[in-house]
Amino acid sequence: MLERYSRQILFDGIGEAGQRRLIDARVVIIGCGALGTAQAEALARAGVGRLRIVDRDFVESSNLQRQIMFTERDAQERLPKAIACVNHLAEINSEIKTEAFVADVNYSNVERIIEGSDVVLDGTDNFATRYLINDACVKHGINWVYGAAVGSYGVTMTVRPHVSPCLRCIFEEAPPAASAPTCDTAGVIMPIISIVAAVQVSETLKLLTGQIDKLHGSLMQFDVWMNEWRRIKLDAPTPECRCCVLGQYEMLEAEAGDFATALCGRDAVQVSPRRPTEVNLPALAERLRAAGEVQVNPYLLRLRAGEYELTVFGDARAIIRGTDDVVTARSLYAKYVGN
């Protein structure tokens, strides 16, 4: 088993003992887009023994420019990203264990998703989910690595609960709406994805092999187009941080309700049910055939109804394309899927 990692074992920072620790490790990757696919491939090739890949979305052709794990066939088949990623990881390293979670990460499931992991990696695209990850990881004492990229700019930091600052220490509140560029307004180029993911994976390898003294201990910022690299040194947690100091995990205490989120750059809204459930997709397909063009596979159902496209997943979650209006999306969900 160790022969395939011989060049990595030769590296002083890992060695044979470190490699064995990687083989025994558990990592959760939340978000399997540009950052998440790069993280997953690197960790699989490094021999991290158990990888859990979590994503709510499916592969589209516009993903292929930067999401390195996916192929044109994945996009044609509309495979859920987590499923497609795990399929490819099996061909990269069949010795590791992988599992796909096709799910929207929210307060009702995040603690179960990260349970038993050694490190959680951020591959998400919004602050709401990152604050959720932060609350869950701090509450359970799990290290996690934040990362983000848009345009040619990227940022990352490593969170060691109660040792280093958490995300709330640095960003007490999410940026105001429309105050920062998004993938819809600024796009994104592959080089910044590669850099941010590389730093995130490097930090993960240090954590998993016990090389704590090699962590960069900073908020790292990069702009590959402007040739700018910055490090803001981080010390201890902020004394009055309501998450890691006061133990207030507000993102885990949200009231029950449905979840509706406009998706970045997609002219689409995701709607999730109040309680996760299991949908019989073939039966739903039969029911919807009179409403429009229906396609179904083991993971999702797609309905074209007029100017809208509904993609329904097995957990009753749906992505409604053709609108960015939450009210309209909820109405379409109720009409075709039910309450």
Image (cartoon, rainbow, N blue to C red):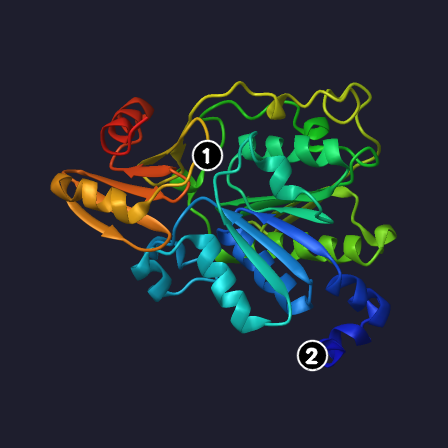
- Image location (x, y in percent) of residue 137: 70, 37
Relative to residue 122, is residue 187 drawn left or right?
left
Is 42 situated above or below 149? below
Q: Which numbered disc, 1 or 2, marks the residue that appears first in the sequence? A: 2
Residue drawn at (53%, 37%), measured in percent from left and top? 105
| Residue pointed to by mark 1 | 276
Please, what is the three-letter code of the amino acid marked with disc 1? Pro
Of residues 195 and 113, the one drawn nearer to the viewer in this rendering: 113
Relative to residue 66, is residue 130 drawn left or right?
right
Can residue 220 be spotted in the picture? no
- Image location (x, y in percent) of residue 160: 78, 40
* Label 1 vs label 2, nearer the camera: 1
Can residue 56 be spotted in the picture? yes
Of residues 84 and 197, the one drawn nearer to the viewer in this rendering: 84
How far is mark 1 from mark 2, CA to CA? 41 Å
How packed mark 1 is, by other alpha carbons closer than 10 Å (few <14, some 14-19, many 20 or more), is some
Q: Quadrant of residue 244?
A: top right
- Image location (x, y in percent) of residue 319: 34, 39
- Which numbered disc covers residue 4? 2
